[in-house]
Image: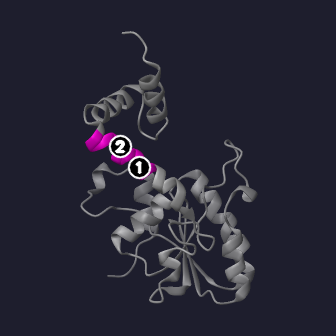
Amino acid sequence: MMPIPDIDHLVGLVARLPGLGPRSARRVVLALLRDPRGKLLPLARALESAAVSVRTCSSCGNLDVEDPCHICRDPARAKDVICVVEGVNDLWALERAGAHRGVYLVLGGVLSALRGVGPADLNVGPLFERLREGAVKEVILALGATVDGATTMYWLQEKIGPYRVEVTRVAQGVPMGGTLDVLDDGTLAAALSARRPV
């Protein structure tokens, strides 16, 4: 097949999205091009609108059309409980679950020597600003159960320590509906060490 520059360019752009390789990107582009008025043009308008209106919340790092975001502005939120997450996707997952009624801090990554991510690369300024104000009662560390996530949690615990606030972390272990025989050793060990009275 002869290359078609406009289509190849579109496939290349779509292939940059997470979880999409060249083959998946071609399928997406083909689906869009089959119905340009119903799919492609509305998508293009929505992308353009989002590029202009969506911004990063200066208080927590969430994405919204206003700064501060709707979560930080919500008077019903417990402003003295901050849940620290790696990315906006984690914040959105917690919001979907309805599990947290406080506010958030999106780090924008985790510490990683291999990828060259250091403390200066993380969005920790707003967290320490709130801690200095003295209005924080608890910081929940809701980071992934990875080596980099654990490194980041230990670093944050050390830095938060002088502020004398409660530092907790999300429990790890047996998922709802899970059985013990299919879990890896690390998950089982975490589940046992995080046990609590019934």
Quadrant of the rendered image containing residue 119: bottom right
SS category of the residue bearing label 2 = helix
Indicate the amino acid at tag 1.
Answer: Arg
Residue 136: image location, x then y, percent: 62, 86
Image disc number at residue 45: 1
Residues at marks 2 and 1 touching, judged by CB atoms closer than 8 Å:
yes
- Asked whether, in this view, residue 163 is left or right of residue 78, the answer is right
Outermost residue, front side: 37
Based on the picture, tell me whether residue 179 belongs to the magenta stretch. no
Which residue is found at the position 69% from the left and 64% from the top? 155
* Res. 69 visible in picture: yes
- Image coordinates for residue 80, horizontal then vertical, percent: 57, 87
SS class of the residue under badge 1? helix
Separation (CA) of disc 2 from disc 1: 6 Å
Magenta stretch, overall SS: helix
Q: Residue at x 47, y 66 (%)?
A: 91
From what the image shows, is residue 142 above or below residue 145? below
Q: Nearer the viewer, residue 137 or 153?
A: 137
Label 2 belongs to which residue?
41
